[in-house]
Image (cartoon, helix red, strand yellow):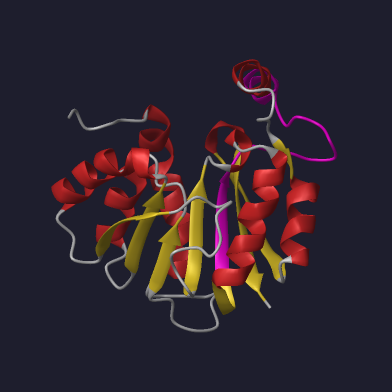
Amino acid sequence: MIKPFSQACENNKRPILMVLERHLGTVRRTVRRTVRHVLEIGSGTGQHAAFFAPRLPHLIWQTSDRRENHDGIRLWIDEAGCANLRAPLDLDVTVRPWPIDKTEAVFSANTAHIMSWPIVEEFVAGVGDVLDAGGLFCLYGPFNYGGTYTSDSNARFDDMLRQHDPLSAIRDFEAVDALATVAGLRLVEDNAMPANNRLLVWRKV
């Protein structure tokens, strides 16, 4: 099997890491307690996990995705050779219970816009269920604000998403934040990222 590759992951991994280091790193200015375990939801190709885990060696980085993506993720894990990087869990956010009881942080990238809205609802509710008190949810991707695209490129991207799958779309930040509030999460940071993306960080209260 050829190792899967995403150019988007290659492009965004360093800017994402800068935010994760601030919230999950060994020097934590915004975390009330030590974070030692992260669940990545929708690990995709496995590139993010293979890049982040060796640079955050104090963390156990737990990958997860639907089973059809596991072989590719394992190829990246095997190449990384990191003791703190875990083989993927079989996780479909719509199937309860999730295969993990609790975690101190959840990271997910480029997932909300490829899910239908009912699945986004299940996703955020599930994150609220598995996060420990004080735990962090870091969600990366494009978002609309006030029902408006933040760029022409995002508008074109949204059109492409809807043509491929009418149920997918760039999500409104306010709608996702409302779901997070219901799930017991409070927004602590909204980071502007390259290519008109955002990295949102919530804390479980």
**Residue depicted at x 43% and y 62%:** 39
The quadrant of the image that shows the N terminus is: top left
Residue 86's image quarter? bottom left
124, above or below 71, in the image: below
Q: Which residues are magenta?
A: 136-157
Is 80 on the left-hand or right-hand side of 43? left
- Residue 45 in view (yes/no): no
**Residue at the front extreme of this rendering:** 96
Q: Tell me residue 185's x, y (percent).
A: 69, 68
Instruction: Check if residue 28 falls in the magenta segment.
Output: no
- Residue 118 can be seen in this image: yes
Task: Check if residue 144 falls in the magenta segment.
Answer: yes
Left or right position of 40 against 122: left
The answer to whether residue 118 is above or below residue 2 is below
- Which x, y percent locates residue 13? 39, 44
Q: Nearer the viewer, residue 5 or 125?
A: 125
Assign the C terminus to one quadrant of the image: bottom right
Report the residue at 72% width, 61% height from top. 180
Provide residue 56's location: percent of width, then percent of height.
32, 64
The x and y percentages for residue 10 are 35, 35
Side (left or right) of 133 relative to 38: right
Judged from this view, the residue extending furthest toward the bottom is 33
The residue that appears at 40% across and 34% down in the rendered structure is 11
